[in-house]
Amino acid sequence: MFENTITIEWLLLIGAFVISMIAQSSVTSTYKKYSSISTSQPLTGSQVAQKILSDHGIYDVQVVQQNKGTLSDHYDPRKKIVALSPNIYNDNSIASIAVAAHEVGHAIQHAQSYVGIKIRDKVLPFAMISSQMAWVVIFISFAVGWLNLTYIGIAMIGVIGLFQLVTLPVEFDASNRALKILSTGYLDEADLSGAKKMLSAAAFTYVAAFLGTLAQIGRLLLMSNRNRRD
């Protein structure tokens, strides 16, 4: 029984690592492919983002270039900015247009009070605290042998998992909005297919992160139960 538990723990750890690597490899290779293919329309990612915002009557959100790395693009509802990395901001590749439209999709969600955003924003503060404290709590619990503290740490990781879970429909919805908008003259059918593959690969990274968190929770529960029996 002891050996079986150890084996499952390692399988969960390895499984989470493999899924994460596959997701990262997929989005990296997909981005590399479609960042080298220009669209039929001479619009950059920033121009597409600004046009979509304007078409949806959103004038209080700025599109800015940030100096962070590849695929660090995001929408910041507090600062009211769509922050795009240099390649996404300046290029007119399929990847640039797809990513820019996706981030604007989040701005549209906020403007339209999309319910998924409201739920995610309520969970976010607890997830931020949990992400900072969960592993500290778990490390201390294992170091001093306080199993009850271990379960508190596991519960905190569960909060992170909950945040990742409610984030999934938000990300999928932003991508669906982006693709629907891009199909109205921004991209032709061939380019739109590439954009869909780009956004699907990016979405898989969120799924992989959630599955990885579930695997960590399962592994920690097995370790805790094993320590309790010992």
Image: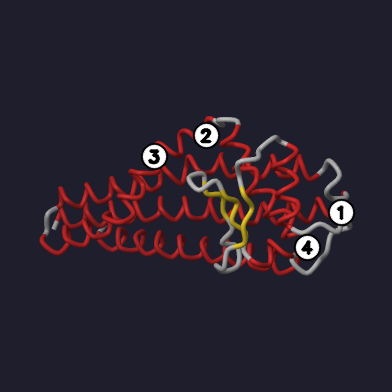
Q: Residue at x 83, y 64 (%)?
A: 38
Q: Looking at the image, is mark 4 or mark 3 earlier in the sequence?
A: 4
What residue does disc 1 label?
190
What amino acid is at disc 1? Ala
What residue does disc 3 label?
123
What amino acid is at disc 2? Gly
The answer for how far apart the CA atoms under marks 3 and 2 are is 11 Å
Task: Give x and y (percent) for residue 221.
Answer: 28, 51
What residue does disc 4 label?
93
Q: Looking at the image, is mark 4 or mark 2 earlier in the sequence?
A: 4
Which image quarter: residue 29?
Answer: bottom right
The answer for how far apart the CA atoms under marks 1 and 4 are is 13 Å
The answer for how far apart the CA atoms under marks 1 and 2 are is 31 Å
Q: Give the quadrant of the N terminus.
A: bottom left
Q: Does the residue at mark 1 contact the one at mark 3 (Cβ under 8 Å)?
A: no
Q: Nearer the viewer, mark 1 or mark 2?
A: 2
Q: Does the residue at mark 4 contact the one at mark 2 (Cβ under 8 Å)?
A: no
What residue does disc 2 label?
116
Q: Looking at the image, is mark 1 or mark 2 earlier in the sequence?
A: 2
What amino acid is at disc 4? Ser
Q: Residue at x 62, y 62 (%)?
A: 65
Q: Is residue 220 above or below residue 58?
A: below
What amino acid is at disc 3? Val
Q: Nearer the viewer, mark 1 or mark 4?
A: 4
Residue farthest to the front, as pictured: 60
